[in-house]
Amino acid sequence: MKAEPGTQKISQAVASRLLPSYRPATPTLRKIAGIIVRNSRFLLTTHVGADADGLGSQVGFYALLKALKKDVKILNNEKIPAHLETLIPKSLIAHLGEGGVTEDKARKMMKDRFVFILDSSEPKRSDKVGALFLELERPWASMDHHVLPARPEYCVDPSYAATAELVWDLYHYFKIPISAKVALALYTGLVADSGNFRYPKTSLRSHLMGGHLVSLGIHSDYVYRAIYENNPKDRIKLVARLFPRAEILPNGVVYVAVYQKDREGLELGDSGTEGIVNQLLAHQGLKAAAVLIESEEGEFKASLRSIGAVDVASLAKKFGGGGHKNAAGLKILKPFAQVLPIIVEELRQL
């Protein structure tokens, strides 16, 4: 779906006046550019549980590298989530496992390639893909916008609201035009990781990027609905099961546990719990929310959100997860029942 002609015309007029004078110049861009110049073959991946920003920035960076005459492939741990399939071109993204490539083929894909991890910090957050390229001793770097310690492999700038915004800046750094397909992927990443332009890292640059991409024909309402209002019908039944037992802690943190039995008899696809944590937090007097999920394998996953100075990313990082101060997640490969009380105690300390 494309933007309304009148809206696009206004955006194009403003973009034609503003963008020629825009000059991105962060040190991170120069560092990434140096890696691009020194290498000819690349593999792109992202964190396990690939999300809109990880995927959108991958597609954008893939097209940029192609425009620079580089040999590039994308390999993730899982296929694109169903609710993002209309926004992210599936044909560009290979994945491991069922319906995807074998580990042997993945090893061949990685041969002689420099690996970029997008929207993530370390190989271990890329699960099997990360383990494979470390096994093959491939050189790597992460391209991210989260707060991370200094390290040679990190191409990080926390001033960006999304990794997709950093990739957009790279296009201007290299003076390469953005196609409509790439614009959709980058806008998807920006909307998701800026909370639809609400989170604290949303800057004038974020809005300039959004306006520029809208001028290329992006229908902003279509993207918003695909990300935030695209739940399966049985999601209503799931919420009805969960919310009555949501617990509000004395410190203003609300959480709910989602057991496998809660999903029985429901058709939820692969994104049935997506966004529930935001619904929990949307009530007066609360400062943070958590949805604690028992995976199909019986292991522990969590989605965390907060408001203001409450830092849920620090909690996630203690257990190998990550994210933003106000939006983070984690996965622990241990039995759900064993981990649940530990995380609830952490929530009590926020």
Image (cartoon, rainbow, N blue to C red):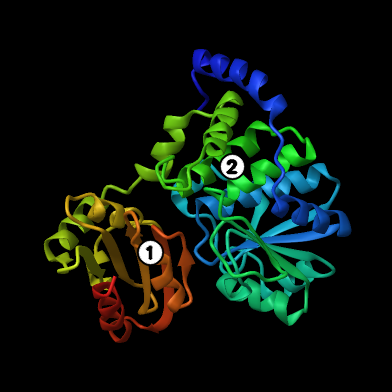
Q: Nearer the viewer, residue 225 or 7?
A: 7
Quarter of the image with the C terminus in it: bottom left
Disc marking residue 177:
none
Q: Residue at x 52, y 34 (%)?
A: 207
Q: Which residue is mark 2?
A: 186
Q: Is residue 65 above or below residue 38?
A: above
Question: What type is the residue that disc 2 sits on?
Answer: Leu
Q: Residue at x 44, y 40 (%)?
A: 197
Q: Locate residue 298: give its quadrant.
A: bottom left
Disc marking residue 311:
1
Task: Please state if 49 lies on the left or on the right of 144 as rendered.
Answer: left
Q: Position of residue 195 (x, y in %)?
A: 41, 46
Q: Position of residue 263 (x, y in %)?
A: 26, 65
Question: Could you give the CA–CA distance between mark 1 and mark 2, rounded to whole angstroms?
Answer: 26 Å
Question: What type is the residue that disc 1 sits on?
Answer: Asp
Q: Is residue 273 above or below residue 282?
A: below
One can see residue 91 in this view? no
Q: Locate residue 153: give its quadrant.
A: bottom right
